[in-house]
Amino acid sequence: MPTASDFERMLRGASLRVTAPRIAVLSAVHLHPHADTDSIIGVVRQNLGAVSHQAVYDVLRALTGAGLLRRIEPQGSVARYEARVGDNHHHVVCRSCGAIADVDCAVGHAPCLDASDDHGFVIDEAEVIYWGTCPECTTAARSS
Amino acid sequence: MPTASDFERMLRGASLRVTAPRIAVLSAVHLHPHADTDSIIGVVRQNLGAVSHQAVYDVLRALTGAGLLRRIEPQGSVARYEARVGDNHHHVVCRSCGAIADVDCAVGHAPCLDASDDHGFVIDEAEVIYWGTCPECTTAARSS
DNA sequence: CGTCTTTTCTGGAGTCAGTCAAGTTAATGA
DNA sequence: TCATTAACTTGACTGACTCCAGAAAAGACG
């Protein structure tokens, strides 16, 4: 788990000013991967006291733009954020409870970039979402 | 292009009642693949006159649930619908203009279902979104 | 064809994530 | 330590989508 000074370094590296809300948001996302904006706001407020939701939205956008966070939003879900960036991993989403887990890319390290017919598009990223049922929900369904 | 009676057959096949708005929505989506709800409402109203947005939302949900339409919602975009269902194809989305094109699955007919580590999830579908730049935007960027 | 039941449609109010705008505060760098 | 900006606060607002209750229409059956 990175420390506050690690976060500070990350912010400076991205030429972003170091502020308490930013550190708090970074740390909240590291602690709660795949958290939605609302719970991030909650966690940040637990640490810092009053922080406007606007600030959190701004920070999330700034950090996402800087590549320190990644925004994911599976269908039917609100935006979620995670701190694993740059390793091209994907996600499994549970259809019944919405749980999200990370999945490393199945094909290789710069993968999945082969569309069978790209229509002339210049493709720079392939995003994969696996849909299914998580272990808990599978068990719950079986026992009912 | 399917005709009104084809749509009627599709609806009956899904044991849905045949109504004018449903036919109109089905035909609108067939004519405008990847259209968002708002433009679908527009097209439907051109054909039928006044139709409530609620009716269109209901119809879209009913048809999606019946498997006659598929709902897609790339990040940063509102919900869009398309009529190609059941053939497991994917999409390329242009980062700059939001254009969407279809891409057949690169791997095979029941593909991409292999996650490297599924965390115990029972996976039933893999959804792939390719991100890139469409030919128009590529040209525009190059010439600027 | 006429009645009955079920489903769908209308119109309007409501919800919720996220955005805009204006003014204040604080981090940075000379 | 002061000026310059970037970041934060407050509060109103937008836009996609949903909920609700009553009216209308479609299909079933005699």
Image (cartoon, coloured by chain):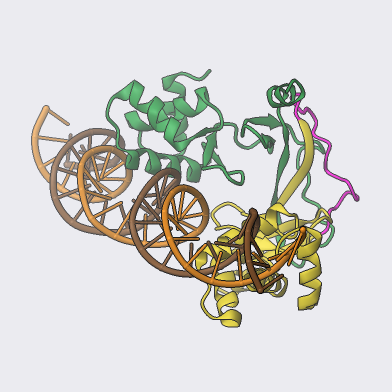
Chain colours: A yellow, B green, C orange, D brown
Q: Main secondary structure of the magenta part?
A: loop
The C terminus of chain B lies in which quarter of the figure?
A: top right
> Vertical placement of A7 versus C6: above or below?
below
> Vertical placement of D25 versus B61: above or below?
above
Q: Is residue A34 visible?
A: yes
Residue A107 lies in the magenta stretch: yes
Residue B80 spot, x, y in % from top left: 53, 38
The answer to whether residue B111 is left or right of residue B69 is right
Q: Say which of A7 and B38 sits in front.
A: A7
Q: Say which of A97 and A114 sits in front.
A: A114
Residue B107 spot, x, y in % from top left: 82, 38
Residue B42 lies in the magenta stretch: no
Q: Say which of C10 and B83 sits in front.
A: C10
Residue B134 spot, x, y in % from top left: 70, 28
Q: What is the quadrant of residue B56 in the picture?
A: top left
Q: Residue at x 40, y 25 (%)?
A: B43
> Vertical placement of B96 versus A37: above or below?
above
Q: Residue at x 58, y 45 (%)?
A: B76
Q: Which residues are the magenta region?
A: A104-121
The answer to whether residue A132 is left or right of residue A38 is right
The answer to whether residue A138 is left or right of residue C7 is right
Q: Say which of C16 and A58 sits in front.
A: A58
Q: Residue at x 81, y 73 (%)?
A: A6
